[in-house]
Image: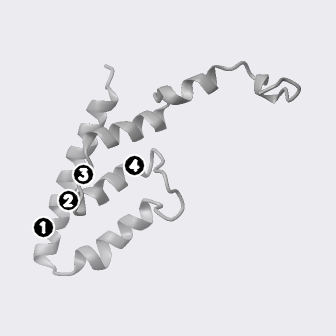
């Protein structure tokens, strides 16, 4: 079975929505738990300060954080991140297509 980046993005968004509902339920039962404990813990796990662009490990946590915020991530932005992380980005293909070591010859004019 092959899963597309679009399908994976939709799956990540669905899981994040389910997790956000759990966080909301906890907040309803224990006021302040969301901003006092859950959000800081998620921000720590998401490596927001360490990595400006998400890694594959950080992406699900960042999708959850986005779902908990005011601006819910859309599937297209998650697809772009997935394609970048999984090497499906067509913008990186020409650089990778060069022969190994070809870009190390500094005698050739640029």
Q: Are marks 2 and 1 in contact (CB under 8 Å)?
A: no
- What is the spatial separation of the Cα atoms under label 3 and label 1, in whole angstroms? 14 Å
Mark closest to the chain's N terminus, 1 or 4:
1
Residue 58 is left or right of residue 91, and the answer is left
Mark 4 nearby-residue class (10 Å; few <14, some 14–19, many ≥20): some
Q: List the residue tagged with mark 3.
A: 16
Q: List the residue tagged with mark 2.
A: 20
- What is the spatial separation of the Cα atoms under label 1 and label 4, in whole angstroms? 23 Å
In the image, is residue 20 above or below residue 96? below
Mark 2 nearby-residue class (10 Å; few <14, some 14–19, many ≥20): some
Foreground residue, 6 or 17? Answer: 6
For numbered disc 3, what is the local secondary structure? helix
Q: Quadrant of residue 7?
A: top left
Foreground residue, 8 or 98? Answer: 98
Q: List the residue tagged with mark 4.
A: 59
Question: Which residue is situated farthest in the right direction here?
Answer: 107
Residue 24 is left or right of residue 83, and the answer is left
Q: Are marks 2 and 3 in contact (CB under 8 Å)?
A: yes
For numbered disc 1, what is the local secondary structure? helix
Colour logic: one colour
- What is the spatial separation of the Cα atoms under label 2 and label 1, in whole angstroms? 9 Å
Mark 3 vs mark 1: in front: 3
Question: Which residue is situated farthest in the front direction here?
Answer: 109
Residue 54 is left or right of residue 96, and the answer is left
Residue 18, image x, y percentages = 17, 52
Mark closest to the chain's N terminus, 2 or 1:
2
Q: Are marks 3 and 1 in contact (CB under 8 Å)?
A: no
Q: List the residue tagged with mark 1.
A: 25
Residue at figure coordinates x 47%, y 33% from the top left: 86
Mark 1 vs mark 4: in front: 4
Q: Quadrant of residue 109?
A: top right
């Amino acid at each position: 079975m092959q899963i597309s980046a679009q399908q994976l993005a939709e799956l990540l968004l669905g899981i994040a929505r389910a997790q956000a509902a759990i966080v909301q339920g906890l907040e309803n039962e224990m006021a302040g738990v969301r901003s006092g404990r859950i959000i800081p813990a998620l921000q720590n796990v998401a490596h927001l300060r360490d990595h400006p662009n998400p890694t594959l490990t950080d992406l699900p946590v960042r999708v959850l954080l986005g779902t908990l915020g005011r601006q819910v991530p859309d599937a297209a932005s998650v697809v772009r991140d997935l394609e970048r992380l999984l090497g499906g980005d067509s913008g990186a293909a020409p650089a990778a297509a060069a022969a190994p070591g070809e870009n190390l010859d500094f005698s050739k004019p640029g």
